[in-house]
Image (cartoon, rainbow, N blue to C red):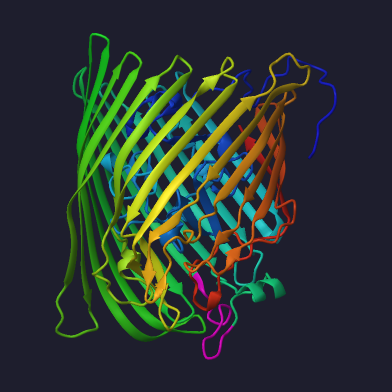
Amino acid sequence: MILFAGRCFSQQTDSLIQAKDSLQEVTVQAFLSNKNRKDVPVSVAVITQKELQNISTTSLLPSINTITGVRMEERSPGSYRLSVRGSTLRSPFGVRNVKIYWNEIPLTDAGGNTYLNLIDVNQLTAVELIKGPSASMYGAGTGGVLLLRSAQPYLAKSTNTFNASLSSGSYNLLNEQTSWIHQQQNFTTGIQQSHLQSDGYRKQSTMRKDALKWDGSIQLKKQTFHFLVFYTDLYYQTPGGLTKAQMLQNPQSARPAAGAIPGAVQQEAAIYNKTVFGGLNHQYQLNKSFTTETSLMLNHTSFSNPAITNYENRDETNTAARTKIIYHTKVASADLQWITGGEWLYNHARIDDYGNKNGHADTLQLKDDLYTNQWLGFTQIQINYQRWNLNAGLSFNDQSMHYKRLTDVNTDYVTTQNKNIAAPRIALLYKLDRSISLYAIAAKGFSPPSLAEVHPQDRIFHSELQPEYGWNFETAIKGDILQHHLQFDLAVYDFELKDAIVIRNNGQGQQYFINAGSISEKAVELWMKYHLLDHSTNCISALNIWSSYTYQPYYFTSYKQGVNDYSGNAVTGVPKNNWVTGIEMETKKNLYFNIQYTQTSSLPLDDANDEYADANHLLQAKMGKHFSIQRTVVHVYVGADNLLNEHYSMGNDINAAARRFYNPAAERNFYLGMNLRF
């Protein structure tokens, strides 16, 4: 560990980094609560803009992984996977079973997929993650909900801010950012451009991302408009999984050829994603009791994937609308809020498959046309009375898919539909005192099969797939004590999942999914953050230590595959123990130091539990300084990842064909950078 020693020669230096003598509360927006974290009956974590970049300026991964019950993985640069409370089981790649909104505008499409890798961490001002079933207000998904924020506050005086940053690091990492933000009393807007590239640790793992974002808000007398427009051009190579022997022999290698099947390098395996996105959120204060809020979204994605055995071209168009009416009143000492509304998501995907000849589209194999519609209607009531807070909601949900193989003559559209699925949620919180609260939740969650699961790699339309569902029962205690110096959150839950969707591989190694039995998900989550020092010290202005621990002994309660009975086996891809802890220090000379340590236990790589990924220990650190030159604020920093030089797989391919489970992560690596604000 690095220790700072020295003498601060002035205590009058203007602080360019915030340092408080006690931990600050944050407002939670989940379920439209708009209350302090400890006062809402929901398992939620909030990451501030500063915390988003405590370790990395290029990825959400380190900050997201500080949340209990959450595991974000990177199979290769640009290829992310997000698991909330064990949802990795059905997400071999990408982000599924987690609903995502940006400034209240839906990002998740009707097919259940979200391209989270299109977003740059520097575009965000906060992240809020709701854990567990939230269908009562946010629709399908048993994992949770991710709420992204990028709104800037209004200022009394018109202000223009310019930012420019450049960082570089190992494996030819280059990250460049420029932005302009305008703020005034009733209007804010900002334009941001970014470029990120890296050669990657392994062969066939180069990535490049160019992004342009424009957003802002306008506040009128009774109305507020928020708009968001972005374009991202993303390219990343996919090196593919390795067997354990291949990983030990050469962890930097890409998937090699096997018999007649070529390797990742020869096939130039990669992802090309060009997405343009536009969204609008409108809030209207009808009177002192009624408010309406409506969000609209339209985006288009051009997606190409030269893979090992095929070359896929996909053209996607997505539309969404979400609206709600909010009624708020006070009766005596009771505060009442009632919300009712609905959401509609639409996706049209044209998928053309070709042979892949050394990275180029070859002979046409098939053309598919798919339409997906998803809607929900919801209502929720929230009552605050003295020390009690009641939050109860109900939604009705419908999903339909229409599929036709255009290369098959004389065929009609095949339709699947999941209709009128009810999802209730009730939560009750009691304040023991002003600092500590107890709450309990009972919620039904469900998650229909995503488009990628109904139409997987085997290119068969699996209309037989059914939604997975279950009841989640949770109780927790949270608060802040010791004069707000210690914040804590301890939650225990039991989620019994039925008709779980799990991955399979056919004889050609192509993935598909089936409903397979049931899973018991009982777990404990503990998060604490303690402010160690106050302003009595001569040099250090803030010193915090925090820790997150997750215990997830998930297991299959009923699961048979042919003649094999996997009942009682540990759930694939879920570590039983995960501990993340860190230290944050700031000095009165605007120097800071952050360190983050992660310990992840071994985890099963297949349903049979006959191969486990080894436990790993990850140490990351970042140090920087803020200072000013005339009117320019300068921020210089240096950081390191995997300081212990651990050999591990950051994103395992669970139930992989030919036991190619492993995607080795980078060895010890470094970066440095500078940011200018004027």
Residue plotted at (32% across, 72% down): 351
Please tell me whether residue 320 is drawn above or below residue 492 in the rendered image. Answer: below
In the drawing, does residue 605 fall left or right of residue 403?
right
How many tags in the picture? 0
Q: Nearer the viewer, residue 377 or 19?
A: 377
Q: Nearer the viewer, residue 250 or 226?
A: 250
Residue plotted at (41% across, 29% down): 28
Q: Nearer the viewer, residue 485 or 613?
A: 613
- Residue 290 percent coordinates (x, y): 19, 23
Q: Is residue 258 magenta?
A: yes
- Residue 205 percent coordinates (x, y): 60, 67
Which quadrant holds residue 185? top left
- Residue 324 percent coordinates (x, y): 22, 35
Q: Main secondary structure of the magenta part?
A: loop
Q: From which residue to which does the magenta span run?
A: 257-270
Q: Is residue 315 magenta?
A: no
* The C terminus - image quarter: top right
Q: Nearer the viewer, residue 306 or 211?
A: 306
In the displayed orientation, state which residue is furthest to the top.
332
Which quadrant holds residue 590? top right
